[in-house]
């Protein structure tokens, strides 16, 4: 089934076929022998028997394989850093360990005995605690209440013994060196404090392994060190830590060992001494730069979009998600915005489109005309279209038909004078539906019944119907299959050739490198580097995004 | 490969049957209710038809449920956006009182009183919509407040009594029933249909067209389906919500005029719990309380189903307490069926 669609796709895109096939062949060879010769041998000492051993972990979502045979070991009193590019499979691996995905392949051993992580409860009983990026605290409840949520100490008459709870919480926080009143509601705490509470909560049960998924991505710099001090304390007391991060300096600050993943496969595990930063980045991005993406040959014209001093304030963390960003996009140009998670590249697009209202500030010019963009409506009228990266929440209208989803942005033009007729909608939608080759049972099928890729094409149809001058695509290939990705690449190239200015983001570096005429790299809300197509390589984009020098 | 295609065909057929039954679930339910009505219909001494199927009975149902039906029409607009309006019953009472007061107490012509009463409802609705759109107040809370306030307003303007001829010495009309009240509720010459019933049917059909064929209607679905997606598509969320709640209030005002005509007086207590009947009609029809799914014809079905069941029970002289129990059971059943479809 999948295969036949794939073939049909290739027939439609002959120039793609060979490249795609060679790419997948390359991927196959790599996953079968994951760098056997390059992997440094782990020094094995008698006392550090791995306490959690994950062997050959596999996980796929539908037909997309996300992890294909990853090994990982956690030891008491030892910090393991798990690194890899976005989409390398780190989060999935953690979720397997947390019992979130019971349908994984491979084996997990706890203290040498096999254990099936079939539910979060099993994982919890094994002593594993995970601190995800989205914290699981209940904001209006106090610190103590949150720590003991679901395990409140009872007093007489089975009533919650508040005094005991507060005292226990105080003791726990004290041991960790955290100075927060247990009676304070969590919503009044800073992000860093919340994270501390989350850790205290995890440690209030018997925790042997603490897993932290990018714990510093939402923290201001001064709080990061507090977290590390706490982590050191935990390590000394015998807790096994797994730390996921993108930030090089942090990895080298905390890690005893480093495990690198790429494209769902294990590249290797090494100590920080064995693995200098430059080599780690090589491990993360691989050597091969793929040719499977079409090269866009554009001749940039007049500037269509000019952004000056764009800022976006985050009132919760009280910091700037986008901090003084300026750039220009010319007609026929594809500009890639690169950056790690939380760097602000996604938010730049939303801010240009007026999605954040008056939280964003800055000046915009469209085709040389200054426009004030306070709301999406104004942006649309100025000729900007924006594909958000949360397709399910802020893209499709799930119960509506494909056609109605496509015409949603252009209803005004289709209404003459009051009546919206099916005939006019069909005239406008049919052509795009076919041109974008949306695969659906019919144009009247609710869009929620389509695959992610086809939903995305329908959304692109919504924006192209408006005939925009500037197209902002926030992770246009997120969560869609390879065939649909290829079609979106082709479409982006075609649109650029027709003279649109396109700005896009992607978590896949190869996409950015292949499609962009220029790559703007962001770091912590600021533009850190601008790279032309010729200059841009996986290494220097990653380098700029992580803000380290791998050469010097 | 062959087996696969056979299975695929079977699946496709199953899917088609399922989508058909999904789409016409309401119709099927209505047919079932009508059959029930025929089976349990008391003997008809005048003809061979079951009493339930006689034109009189049918028109009775429409007439009795015209006020709830008009309320449900407005409610559908609000529910399509994912909201709810609890104030319609009170707004109905307020408009009924205001209308009677102007006609009976002040002797104003209907041409003035009617638009004023309807407008009062619309203003109440717009206030709710404005609160919800501007302050992001939950619709449940905002309309709950209006539910109390409109009832208070009704009692304030009436002085706490039922407004009818002769109720106070200074009333312009001291005896008899104003002609307009009579006209609204008596059969038209030639056809045995009351203007109130016609008003309900006309309102519902008109709004069905509006929802189906105008930008406004599409915006309601978009907001209910995904508010953020709608906003990013350039839809004015606030304005659309104010319009939805405003229309809902306007129809509550219209239903108030109908109520005053049917009762031939302005009762400040009129319409209490009607909001629940209106919501029930919408939900039983199959429009989702989560918003974005459903349509006006489903609301017609829902209104008819409630109306028929009530009629069946009353024809069989089932006491009111059983009727309420049955209504509860039907609402639960309807919502359970809806949830099943979503899974």
Image (spheres, coloured by chain):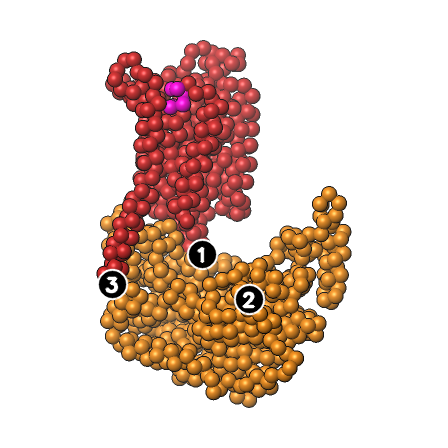
Q: Secondary structure at mark 3?
A: loop
Quick check: A150 above or below B33?
A: below
**Residue A232, horizontal then vertical, whole percent:** 68, 74
Q: Which residue is mark 3?
A: B1
Nearer-N-terminus badge (2/1): 2
Q: Quadrant of the C terminus of chain A?
A: bottom right
Q: Which residues are magenta?
A: B311-316
Q: Which of B340 and A441 lies nearest the eye of the viewer?
A: B340
The residue most toward the top is B175
The hue in which chain A appears in the rendered picture of the protein: orange
Kindly identify which chain the residue marked by label 3 belongs to.
B
Specify whether A7 is left or right of B108: left
Chain letter, disc 2 residue: A
Disc 1: host chain = A
Residue depth check, mark 2 versus mark 1: number of the one nearer the observer: 2
**Which label sits on residue A115?**
2
Residue at (50% x, 58% y) in the render:
A357
Q: In the rendering, at what x and y percent does residue B148 appear?
A: 55, 32
Looking at the image, which residue is at 37% across and 54% down?
A: A448
Dot 1 corresponds to which residue?
A393
- Is residue B213 visible in the rendered image? The answer is no
Q: Is residue A281 above or below residue A363?
A: below
Determine the colour of chain B: red
Q: Residues within 10 Å of mark 1 (few under 14, many from 20)?
A: some
Q: CA distance from mark 1 to mark 3?
A: 38 Å
């Amino acid at each position: 089934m999948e295969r036949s669609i794939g073939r049909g796709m290739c027939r439609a895109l002959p120039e793609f076929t060979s490249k795609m096939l060679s790419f997948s062949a390359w991927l196959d060879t790599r996953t079968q022998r994951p760098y056997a010769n390059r992997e440094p041998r782990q020094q094995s000492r008698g006392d550090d028997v791995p306490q959690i051993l994950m062997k050959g972990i596999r996980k796929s979502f539908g037909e997309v394989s996300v992890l294909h045979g990853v090994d990982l070991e956690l030891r008491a009193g030892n910090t393991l850093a798990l690194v890899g590019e976005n989409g390398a499979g780190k989060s999935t691996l953690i979720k397997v360990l947390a019992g979130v995905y019971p349908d994984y392949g491979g084996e997990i051993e706890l203290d040498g005995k096999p254990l099936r992580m079939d539910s979060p409860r099993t994982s919890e009983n094994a002593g594993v605690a995970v601190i995800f990026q989205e914290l699981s605290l209940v904001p209006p409840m106090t610190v103590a209440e949150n720590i003991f949520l679901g395990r409140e100490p009872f007093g007489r008459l089975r009533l919650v013994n508040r005094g005991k709870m507060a005292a226990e919480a105080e003791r726990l926080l004290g041991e960790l060196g955290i100075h927060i009143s247990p009676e304070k509601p969590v919503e009044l705490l800073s992000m860093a404090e919340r994270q501390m509470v989350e850790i205290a909560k995890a440690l209030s049960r018997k925790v042997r392994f603490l897993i932290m998924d990018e714990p510093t991505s939402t923290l201001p710099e001064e709080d990061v060190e507090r977290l590390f001090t706490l982590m050191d304390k935990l390590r000394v007391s015998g807790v096994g830590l797994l730390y996921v991060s993108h930030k090089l300096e942090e990895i080298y600050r905390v890690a005893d060992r480093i495990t690198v993943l790429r494209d769902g496969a294990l590249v290797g595990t090494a100590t920080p001494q064995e693995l200098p930063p430059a080599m780690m980045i090589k491990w993360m991005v691989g050597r091969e730069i793929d040719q499977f993406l079409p090269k866009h040959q554009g001749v940039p014209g007049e500037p269509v979009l000019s952004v000056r001093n764009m800022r976006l304030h985050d009132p919760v963390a009280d910091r700037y998600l986008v901090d003084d960003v300026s750039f220009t996009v010319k007609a026929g140009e594809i500009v890639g915005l690169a950056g790690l998670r939380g760097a602000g590249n996604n938010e730049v697009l939303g801010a240009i489109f007026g999605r954040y209202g008056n939280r964003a500030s800055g000046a915009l010019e469209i085709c040389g005309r200054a426009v004030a963009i306070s709301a999406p409506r104004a942006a649309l009228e100025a000729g900007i279209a924006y594909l958000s990266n949360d397709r399910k929440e802020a893209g499709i209208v799930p119960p509506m038909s494909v056609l109605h989803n496509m015409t949603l942005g252009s209803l005004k033009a289709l209404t003459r004078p009051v009546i919206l007729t099916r005939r006019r909608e069909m005239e406008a939608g049919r052509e795009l539906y076919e041109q974008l080759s949306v695969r659906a049972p019919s144009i009247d099928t609710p869009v929620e019944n389509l695959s992610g890729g086809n939903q995305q094409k329908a959304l692109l149809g919504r924006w192209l119907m408006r005939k925009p001058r500037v197209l902002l695509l926030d992770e246009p290939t997120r969560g869609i299959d390879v065939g649909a990705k290829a079609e979106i690449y082709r479409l982006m190239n075609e649109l650029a050739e027709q003279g649109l200015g396109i700005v896009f983001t992607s978590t896949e570096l190869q996409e950015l490198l292949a499609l962009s005429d220029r790559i703007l790299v962001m770091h912590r809300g600021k533009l850190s580097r601008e790279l032309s197509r010729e200059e841009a390589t996986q290494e220097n984009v990653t380098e700029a995004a992580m803000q380290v020098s791998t050469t010097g | 490969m062959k087996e696969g295609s056979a299975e695929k065909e079977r699946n496709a057929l199953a899917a088609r049957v399922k989508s058909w039954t999904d789409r016409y679930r309401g119709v099927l339910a209505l047919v079932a209710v009508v059959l029930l009505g025929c089976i349990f219909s008391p003997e008809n001494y005048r003809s061979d038809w079951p009493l339930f199927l006689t034109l009189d009975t049918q028109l009775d149902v429409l007439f009795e449920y015209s006020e709830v039906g008009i309320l449900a029409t407005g409610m559908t607009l609000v529910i399509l956006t994912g909201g709810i309006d609890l104030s319609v019953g009170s707004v109905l009472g307020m408009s009924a009182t205001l209308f009677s007061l102007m006609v009976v107490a002040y002797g104003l012509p209907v041409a003035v009183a009617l638009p004023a009463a309807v407008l009062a409802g619309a203003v109440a609705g717009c206030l709710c919509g404005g609160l919800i759109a501007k302050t992001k107040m939950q619709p449940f809370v905002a309309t709950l407040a209006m539910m109390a306030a409109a009832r208070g307003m009704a009692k304030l303007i009436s002085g706490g009594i039922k407004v009818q001829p002769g109720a106070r010495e200074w009333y312009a009309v001291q005896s008899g029933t104003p002609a307009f009240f009579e006209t609204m509720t008596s059969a038209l010459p030639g056809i045995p249909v009351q203007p109130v019933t016609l008003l309900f049917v006309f309102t519902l059909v008109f709004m069905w067209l509006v929802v189906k064929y105008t930008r406004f209607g599409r915006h309601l679905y978009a907001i209910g389906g995904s508010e953020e997606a709608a906003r990013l598509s350039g839809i004015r969320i606030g304005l659309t919500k104010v319009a939805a709640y405003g229309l809902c209030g306007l129809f509550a005002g219209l239903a108030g005029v109908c109520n005053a005509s049917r009762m031939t007086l302005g009762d400040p207590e009129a319409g209490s719990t009607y909001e629940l009947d209106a919501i029930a009609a919408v939900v039983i029809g199959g429009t989702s309380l989560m918003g974005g799914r459903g349509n006006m014809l489903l609301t017609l079905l829902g209104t008819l189903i409630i109306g028929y069941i009530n009629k069946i029970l009353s024809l069989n002289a089932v006491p009111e307490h059983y009727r309420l129990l049955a209504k509860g059971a039907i609402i639960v059943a309807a919502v359970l069926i809806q949830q099943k479809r979503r899974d």
